Amino acid sequence: MSKFFVKTEQINNNDIVIIGDDVNHIINVLRMKKTDEIQICNQDTGDNYNAEIVNYSKNEVECKIKDKINATTESNVHITLFQGIPKFEKMELIIQKNTEVGIKSIVPVIMERTVVKLDEKIASKKLERWQKIAEIAAKQSMRDIIPQIGNITKLKDIDTTEFDAVLVAYENEEHNMLKTELQKLESKVKSNNSSEQQYNIAIVIGPEGGISEKELVMLAEKNAKFVSLGKRILRTETAGVVMAGNIIYELEYNS
């Protein structure tokens, strides 16, 4: 079943109105008609509904809620990816795949070895496109939220105080494995005796050239932990997906 996102103001009791680019996709690409069923998610609340198309025009699709879906596809592991900005086509792949894996947000970071140049105009257009890619990937993977693409920032300006752990994938780390840090974090969270275990984790991935020595010092001062992802060197577009997938598996499904 196809899934679409709406905002709270598009929902009125049992009626939902879909607007924007999704209208063309529903009518002309999927060729859906009246009485066809779709899944709709309130992107502000994460609430999901099964709905039936009751009417449509070139500007909107009117739907009627049939029932609310109580299950969720979201994890109790909230991951923010601080991604050193690579070449733009790689950034698009990073956003798409990390959205599918289940991260909550992505913050593009300008680092010493970032090679692309971003003026204000280009940055604004890229952020808009990256957010759209996240939305499309969220629909395809049946997410209950659209991961937010944060404003482009510098590494020194990252605020890590809100996270339970800040983990940095570092190819020269030989002893501290990702699983070791996750076991420590799991014990820490369990010791809080909370009935609902939730994790708020930041992961940091460098651009194509990796993380500089100066940046390693800066991250250490922010209480980041450097971890190995194994014996092989991963590309920047691969590392975040591997890291996020392992974190969610270990903390959500294997605890």
Image (cartoon, rainbow, N blue to C red):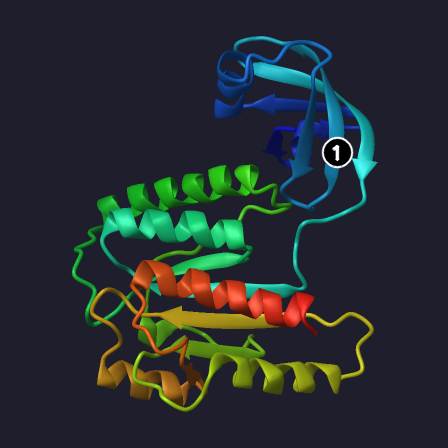
- Determine crowd level at label 1: few under 14, some 14-19, many 20+ residues with C-alpha closer than 10 A: many
In which quarter of the view is residue 76 placed?
bottom right
Q: Residue furthest front?
A: 231
144 shown above or below 109: above
Q: Residue at x 44, y 58 (%)?
A: 106
Residue 22 relative to residue 142: left or right: left
Tell me where residue 252 appears, x and y as whole percent.
Answer: 67, 67
* Residue at the spot of label 1: 49
Q: Is residue 247 left or right of residue 75?
A: left
| Image label count | 1
Residue 13 in the image, given as x and y percentages of width and height: 81, 28
The kind of secondary structure element at disc 1 is strand
Left or right, 230 with respect to 56, comes to left
Tell me what residue is drawn at x 42 percent, y 41 percent: 133
Residue 3: where, in percent of width, then height?
Answer: 62, 32
- Please tell me which residue is depicted at 23% across the width and 64% down the height of the picture: 208
Task: Name the quarter where the N terminus is drawn.
Answer: top right
Amino acid type, mark 1: Tyr
In the displayed structure, would residue 73 be above or below residue 222?
above
Could you tell me which quadrant the C terminus lies in?
A: bottom right
Tell me which corner region of the image, top left, top right, bottom left or bottom right, holds residue 253.
bottom right
255 to the left or right of 113: right
Residue placed most toward the observer, 236 or 24: 236
The image shows residue 16, relative to residue 167, as above or below, that is above
Q: Residue at x 52, y 9 (%)?
A: 58
Where in the figure is residue 245, as x and y percent of width and height? 52, 63
